[in-house]
Amino acid sequence: MKINAVCRQCRRAGVKLFLKGEKCFSAKCPMVKRKYPPGVHGPKGPVRLSEFGIQLREKQKAKKIYGIREKQFRKYYEHVSKRDQPGEELIRLLESRLDNVVFRLGFATSRHQARQSVSHSHIKVNKRKVNIPSYQVKVGDTIEVKQESRKKAFFINLTKKLAKLKPPSWLTVDPKNLLGEVTSTPTSKELEQSIDTSLIIEFYSR
């Protein structure tokens, strides 16, 4: 079975990063049978990382999950570094990105697909076209699939899929109208739990 570069990222991180949408939840996911790092020599023994290596790996994992480059990720850290709970605030900023919200609402099967939908102008915020994936949504904002885009292949059967979806409690979704709303800010329990933000804060605080 051919393993593409995206799936190799999950195997390298040692956890599912959910970068391939529905495939990540199926038996076809490479992490099901190959839970070891990629390489021509197959599984190896455990690798001992230094404290720096552990922090770096956690930072890289977070960047891959949200699909963010280093320069922008560092800016997020600098924005929250002086706050009381910088780790939580960092993830809250990432969760509030428009591309992530589009993914959380079920308008896309992965953050990568959500980012493309936003960049290709398929999404509106408060009835206005927004094509910036990093746009920060706020409580009260409405997010919808543009009317003209609903005829495209991916969006045609989206209503049925959304009817089975349960979004996070800080979001609501209207499947019939392909409309979502930010009703509150994510609580600490609703933030991405697979990321140890303390290690990321320690990495940048060195």
Image: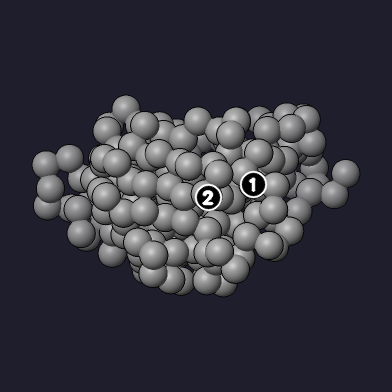
Q: Secondary structure at mark 2?
A: loop
Task: Give the quadrant of residue 92.
Answer: top left
Q: Of the residues under marks 2 and 1, which one precedes in the sequence?
A: 1
Establish if 2 lies above or below 37: below
Residue topped by disc 1: 158
Q: Nearer the viewer, residue 65 or 185?
A: 185
Task: State the mark number for residue 56.
Answer: none
Q: Mark 2 highlights which residue? A: 178
Label 1: state its secondary structure: helix
Query: To which quarter of the image does residue 170 belong?
Result: top left
Residue at the spot x=18%, y=53% of the render? 81
Res 159 visible: yes
Q: Are marks 2 and 1 in contact (CB under 8 Å)?
A: yes
Amino acid beneath label 1: Leu
Please state the horizontal and vertical placement of residue 158, each as a whole percent of the image. Answer: 64, 47
Q: Position of residue 116 (x, y in %)?
A: 58, 65
What amino acid type is highlighted by mark number 2? Leu
Vertical relation: 130 (above or below) 140:
below
**Image color mode:** one colour
Question: Which residue sits at x=46%, y=35%?
Answer: 167
Q: Is residue 104 visible?
A: no
Position of residue 197 in the picture relative to residue 64 (left or right): left
- Which residue sits at x=55%, y=44%? 176
